[in-house]
Image (spheres, rainbow, N blue to C red):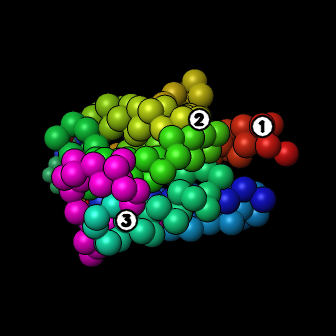
Amino acid sequence: MIKVFGISTSPRIAATAWIINEALRYLEKEYNAETRFFSVYGKKINFCIHCNNCIKKGGCIFNDAMKDVYSGFEWADAVLIGTPVYQGTLSGQAKVIFDRMRAFVAKNPHSLNGKLGAAIADGGDRIGGQEIALRSIIDFYMINEMIPISGGSFGANLGATIWSKDKGSDGAKEDKEGLKSLYKTLDRLVDVWKNLYT
Ligand SMILES: Cc1cc2nc3c(=O)[nH]c(=O)nc-3n(C[C@H](O)[C@H](O)[C@H](O)COP(=O)(O)O)c2cc1C
């Protein structure tokens, strides 16, 4: 069955972490998926400092929580990245993870080739930059040879967009339209994976 790695890039356990856990629970229940969850909450993750150790010698000079992210990417058939919208785009934490993934692909530029990726963004405003955040996650997937997946037209054009109203997980739970975009995206993720790999 499909193995899905869900990442919450919010520095707290609130809306984004709840949404990712809800997504993983849905995939387990509907599709018998195997899942892993990672949150940046409470974790030490250094910025990439462009020392090029990963290119020249292999491996990152930092030994921090990215090791759990690397092992999750290695293990997964599909990755779900969720971000709160910060200043109209993804969180700084999400961007740091993307930059640090350079060390992962430095070993083998094709190491993520063919893995599926879906994107989730939640904002305090109904239209607060969710789609711009989704596009940045999708760009990361494309740059790293992954296959970006959305839920398609009529509801989940670029992925899942949620309006938390700045009320954390309570707000996310209340956004029924947003949750529809999540389930639609997850259904398509599994459908594409089945078509390609089973
Ligand atoms: C630094 C910062 C910037 C934010 N900028 C935006 C924004 O541009 N647009 C928006 O809709 N919400 C913005 N928000 C609100 C969060 O995106 C929203 O509350 C989100 O659901 C928080 O996710 P969390 O509960 O997982 O931390 C911002 C919050 C913070 C802390």
Q: Residue at x 42, y 68 (%)?
A: 67
Judged from the image, the secondary structure of the residue bearing numbered disc 3 is: helix
The outermost residue toward the top is: 153
**Is 34 in front, or is 157?**
34
Q: Quadrant of residue 4?
A: bottom right
Judged from the image, the secondary structure of the residue bearing numbered disc 1 is: helix
**Is 69 in front, or is 50?**
50
The outermost residue toward the bottom is: 42
Q: Are marks 1 and 2 in contact (CB under 8 Å)?
A: yes
Q: Residue at x 52, y 65 (%)?
A: 71
- Find residue 89 and report its horizontal and vertical position in percent: 25, 38
Task: Determine crowd level at label 3: few under 14, some 14-19, many 20+ residues with C-alpha closer than 10 A.
Answer: many
- Find residue 100 and report its horizontal and vertical position in percent: 33, 53
Measured Cα–Cα span from mark 1 to mark 3 = 29 Å
Judged from the image, the secondary structure of the residue bearing numbered disc 2 is: strand
Kind of residue at badge 1: Leu
Residue labelled with disc 3: 66
Measured Cα–Cα span from mark 1 to mark 2 = 11 Å
Residue labelled with disc 2: 147
Q: Which label sits in the foreground, 1 or 3?
A: 3
Residue labelled with disc 1: 196
Residue 152 inside the magenta-drawn segment: no
- Find residue 47 and report its horizontal and vertical position in percent: 21, 56
- Magenta span of residues: 38-59
- Looking at the image, tell me whether mark 3 or mark 2 is earlier in sequence order: 3
- Looking at the image, tell me whether mark 1 or mark 2 is earlier in sequence order: 2
Q: Is residue 51 visible?
A: yes
For this view, does 110 lie left or right of residue 135?
A: right
